[in-house]
Image: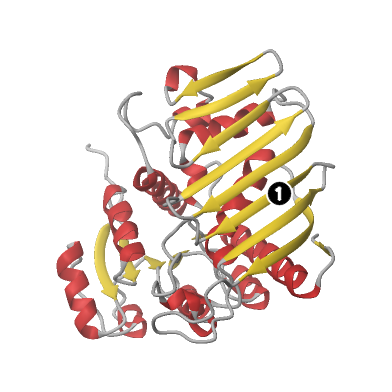
């Protein structure tokens, strides 16, 4: 008798913009059936359904959930909508993928973690899914780097470098209290803790809003950049720089961990190699499964020399989400608990920047 194949998960997308497009590509690559999309208006929803090849659009999340058309909901809407929409999807029995920041307050993130019990609920910290990030993590876990001494990280973009650059994210009512750190600094901290296996214990910070007035927003309060000093539980210290006003940097996420025996460094804009430094010399590790740890090699989708990038990392993340829905336990899948952690670190950074001094984290 032929083995029965599991039915493709039915997926609904909230959001028809750039991130909704990225989510839809990853869902399709993972074998999902894209059954619905909701955008900011019925007209935009209909346009997104046509452009993304989704079966139909719905006028609202409530309409889509009421139709019983989805098993998994991807939330890719403005930050302030995340908590309510993810809670509604969970209450309807759906599994949820929710963009970061998971919520704009720690209290809302805590509610989401509680509501997600019994469901697969994931946050796309997708840089974990670059094979060479997993290789860096494997080397640290194996003790190759030795005791962690210092960390240096940055996440730099330039898309808001001019006063006439604008976006809904600059508005605290739609984007939340923090902008640059919540949006991209959360990725940086997640990568630091994921690769190092250590936790940030305390932060001191400064933020700057260089453009208080933009094309469509006045008296902007959200930060363009943040500079953070971190202390780690294991005794290491480091610095993190986050900016959306760094000319020439399109999406440059860089992290370097220096241990007593070796250092490892990864650059998201150059994801085909991992730098490993030692006092006696350095090594460039290629994205070639023949040289990688098993958890890194499993994420290699193309032969070495055939570049993998951001969408491939996103595809790997979504594939792991759907595997978890089917009952698997993928290594390193970022869940709502990780989104809550990011919310707590973001709150500590903003409190430190506004009040001065250090803020401790548990």
Asked which quadrant contains residue 313, the reply is: top left
Is residue 227 toward the left or the right of residue 61 in the image? Answer: right
Percent from the top left, x then y, of residue 111? Answer: 63, 75
Q: From the viewer's perspective, is residue 203 above or below residue 132?
A: below
Q: Is residue 68 left or right of 51 when viewed as pictured?
A: right
Percent coordinates x, y for residue 40 in the rendering: 31, 82
Quadrant of the image containing the C terminus: bottom right
Residue 359: image quadrant is bottom right
- Give the colouring mode of the picture: secondary structure
Q: Number of labelled discs? A: 1
Q: Is residue 166 above or below residue 288?
A: below
Considering the image in quadrants, where does the N terminus appear?
Answer: top left
- Residue 354 in the image: x percent, y percent? 74, 75
Looking at this view, is 197 or 347 the one in front? 347
Q: Residue at x 31, y 55 (%)?
A: 27
- Identify the residue at horizontal 20%, vertical 63% (top origin): 52
Q: Name the one closer to the observer, 204 or 43.
A: 204
- Let me know if residue 205 appears in the view: yes
On screen, residue 190 versus residue 252, left or right, reads right
Determine the image quadrant of residue 24: bottom left
Of residues 95 and 306, the one nearer the viewer is: 306
Q: Is mark 1 on a helix, strand or loop?
A: strand
Q: Mark 1 points at which residue?
A: 239
Q: Which residue is drawn at 28% across and 54% down?
A: 25
Residue 7 visible in the snapshot: no
Q: Residue 136 placed where, x, y %?
A: 59, 31
Residue that extends furthest to the top in the rendered view of this protein = 280
Decide: is 161 above or below 201: below
């Amino acid at each position: 008798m032929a083995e029965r194949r599991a039915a493709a998960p039915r997926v609904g997308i909230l959001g028809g913009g750039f991130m909704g497009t990225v989510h839809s590509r990853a869902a399709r690559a993972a074998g999902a059936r894209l059954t619905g999309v909701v955008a900011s208006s019925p007209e935009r929803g209909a346009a997104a359904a046509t452009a993304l090849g989704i079966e139909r659009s719905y006028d609202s999340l409530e309409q889509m959930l009421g139709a019983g058309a989805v098993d998994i909901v991807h939330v890719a809407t403005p930050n302030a909508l995340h908590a309510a929409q993810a809670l509604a999807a969970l209450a309807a029995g759906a599994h949820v993928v929710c963009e970061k920041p998971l919520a704009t307050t720690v209290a809302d993130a805590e509610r989401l973690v509680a509501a997600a019990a019994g469901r697969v609920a994931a946050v796309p910290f997708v840089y974990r899914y670059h094979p060479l990030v997993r290789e860096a993590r494997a080397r640290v876990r194996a003790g190759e780097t030795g005791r962690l001494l210092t960390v240096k990280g940055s996440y730099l973009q330039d898309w808001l470098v001019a006063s006439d650059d604008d976006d809904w994210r600059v508005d605290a009512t739609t984007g939340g209290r923090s902008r640059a750190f919540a949006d991209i600094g959360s990725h940086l901290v997640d990568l630091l803790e994921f690769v190092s296996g250590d936790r940030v214990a305390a932060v001191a910070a400064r933020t700057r809003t260089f453009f208080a007035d933009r094309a469509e927003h006045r008296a902007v309060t959200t930060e363009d950049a943040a500079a953070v000093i971190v202390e780690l539980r294991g005794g290491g210290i480091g610095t993190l720089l986050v900016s959306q006003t760094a000319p020439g940097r399109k999406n440059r996420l860089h992290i370097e961990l220096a241990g007593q025996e070796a250092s490892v460094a990864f650059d998201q804009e150059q994801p085909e190699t991992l730098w490993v430094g030692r006092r006696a010399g350095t090594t460039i590790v290629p994205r070639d499964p023949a040289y990688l740890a098993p958890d890194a090699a499993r994420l290699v989708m193309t032969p070495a020399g055939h570049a993998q990038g951001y969408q491939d990392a996103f595809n790997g993340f979504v594939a792991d989400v759907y595997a978890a829905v089917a009952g698997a336990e993928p290594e390193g899948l970022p869940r709502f608990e990780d989104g809550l952690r990011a919310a707590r670190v973001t709150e500590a950074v903003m409190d430190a920047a506004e009040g001065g001094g250090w803020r401790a984290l548990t």
